[in-house]
Amino acid sequence: MLDDMKRKAAWAALEFIPRHTVVGVGTGSTVNHFIDALATIKHEIKGAVSSSEQSTAKLKDLGIPVLDLNSIDRFSVYVDGADEINPDKHMIKGGGAALTREKIVAAVAETFICIVDESKQVPVLGRFPLPVEVIPMASSYVARELNKIGGRAVLRAGVTTDNGNVILDVHDLEIRHPIQLEAQINNIVGVVTNGIFAIRAADKVLVGTPAGTTILK
Ligand SMILES: O=C(CO)[C@H](O)[C@H](O)COP(=O)(O)O
């Protein structure tokens, strides 16, 4: 059921992909459906920029050229999932540990289209533990600093990001001011990125439901 809702949101995104341009591609099970959809128009796009090794492998398997982000000044649309999204289109991302590259690719895009199943919608962010990518030698220090702001940071066991770093998942946060908290956590020395996407929120949100796909107002 959940997977079916993810698929609906992902395929609905095709309608918003301009032809003859580069497409930004996120990471995760919802995005995997989007990559399947994108493959059906692969001859009508210039290629993709990818946010993870995982998505790069799938894009290449399906014959979609993957371009170097450094070769592109700007592109139109970035499509990605989320772990949580609030009514202001602020998100928590990073459940798949790809948050840093996701934030980088999103920054170069004119439009961020978020594709989610309806279970990801929340009134207040924070039920999903907030992922924070950290330089390995700083993980204990950063965990202590995150605990000071009211969270409970737990090292994600056995995970190394595509950038060679570790992930701290911060439990028990009630994120009432996402923009401020995103900036505050990014200011801790040793943090590479945190999974709050609020300074740059989604522009359009496609929500897969049992009945079809709706667009968040
Ligand atoms: O941020 C992400 C990966 O880092 C994903 O977008 C997020 O975890 C949602 O994943 P899924 O589509 O599998 O539910």
Image (cartoon, helix red, strand yellow):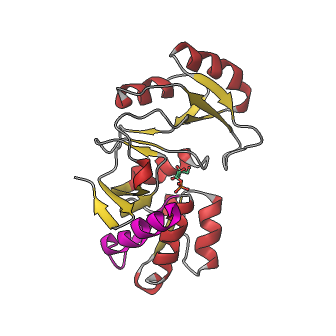
Queried whether the magenta region covers residue 175, the answer comes back as no
Percent from the top left, x then y, of residue 92?
A: 46, 41
Percent from the top left, x then y, of residue 110?
A: 32, 57
Percent from the top left, x then y, of residue 95?
A: 58, 46
- The residue lying toward the viewer, choosing from 209 and 153, is 209
Queried whether the magenta region covers residue 21, the answer comes back as yes
Q: Residue at x 49, y 25 (%)?
A: 173
Q: Residue furthest right?
A: 158
Q: Is residue 189 visible?
A: no
Q: Is residue 65 left or right of residue 179?
A: right
Q: Is residue 98 visible?
A: yes
Up-down relation of residue 48 to residue 207 (above or below): below
Q: Residue at x 36, y 63 (%)?
A: 77
Q: Residue at x 40, y 49 (%)?
A: 107
Up-down relation of residue 65 to residue 174 (above or below): below
Percent from the top left, x then y, of residue 154?
A: 67, 28
Q: Residue furthest bottom?
A: 43
Q: How many marks?
A: 0
- The residue lying toward the viewer, choosing from 94 and 25, is 94
**Res. 164 image quadrant:** top right
Q: Residue furthest left?
A: 217
Q: Which residues are magenta?
A: 1-26
Q: Residue furthest top?
A: 148
